[in-house]
Amino acid sequence: MSTVEERLQHINETIRLACERSGRNPEEVTVIAVTKSVGPGRAKEVLDAGLVDLGENRKEGLDEKQPVLGDAARWHFIGSLQSRKVKDVVNRIDMLHSLDRASLAEEIRKRAVRPLDCFVQVNVSGEQSKSGLAPEETEPFIRALAGNDKIRIAGLMTMAPNTDDEQQIRESFRGLRELRDRIADLGLPHAPCTELSMGMSNDFGIAVEEGATFVRIGTAIVGYESGEKR
Ligand SMILES: *Cc1c(COP(=O)(O)O)cnc(C)c1O
């Protein structure tokens, strides 16, 4: 059994090598530890190992962990967010990785007390099972948010296609980067769009090679929890 700290060292080494191969600086990459499947005890181990960015995909995950960990962490919401839950979530998170529709943006406008850094989720691979905007819908969607004073578009987010084919995974990450570059070049004041949220336990090395600035890593950091640490 390896510890969180050992697993994190291995991940940092993988990121360092991926940066070396692609001529990037590892400091450009932020690791988000996805703690959605473990309890506050394991999440605390992640913070003790030196990470500050935690990812949750349900309101209940925030309810369970924030009273224990609170200000020690930076909170990322990575799951699809129902509009009726916005009011319970929006003012407790630092970044939202799953902005995917106008009705969600409007609910955030009504409920947020300050501007929220958001990633627009894009379905680059076009898989039916995946949420997110089609690539060609992304720029018009972002332009239409110009009047929404509670939303700042930090960047774009995607999930790789469900395949073992590394080339297909790489192409979807590259597609997101190219789209990010085009949108950043527009110079929209509400959408600096400099960031790329992509890469999970099985594919973060590829994502870093293709330009990820935030990787969302769950099992490879926190492992599978059998319940003893909860
Ligand atoms: C669960 C989840 C992750 C982390 O997945 P792992 O395979 O455990 O690394 C990343 N992003 C999203 C959106 C998730 O739901």
Image (spheres, rainbow, N blue to C red):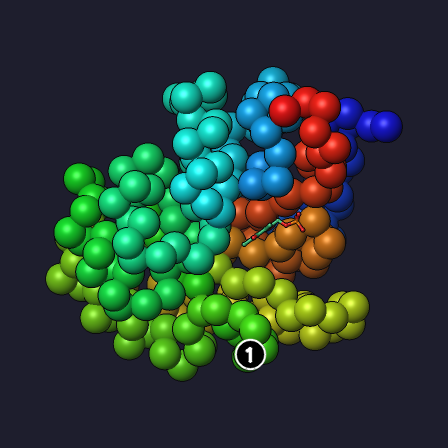
Q: Is residue 86 left or right of residue 227?
A: left
In the displayed structure, 145 sits above or below 52; it is below
In the displayed structure, 36 sits above or below 153; it is above
Spot occupied by residue 128 in the image (x, y as percentages of width and height): 55, 79
Q: Residue furthest right?
A: 1
Determine the residue positioned at 41% across, 42% down.
Answer: 59
Question: Which secondary structure, mark 1?
Answer: loop
Spot occupied by residue 4 in the image (x, y as percentages of width and height): 72, 27
Spot occupied by residue 8 in the image (x, y as percentages of width and height): 71, 32
Corner quadrant of residue 39: top right
Q: Label 1 crowding class (10 Å Cα cut-off): few <14, some 14-19, many 20+?
A: few
In the displayed structure, 195 sits above or below 124; it is above
What amino acid does circle 1 point to?
Gln
Q: Which residue is mark 1?
A: 128
Determine the residue positioned at 25% across, 45% down.
Answer: 87
Q: Does residue 160 appear in the picture of this structure?
A: yes
Determine the residue positioned at 36% across, 78% down.
Answer: 137
Quadrant including the N terminus: top right
Corner quadrant of residue 224: top right
224 or 48: nearer the viewer: 224
96 or 81: nearer the viewer: 81
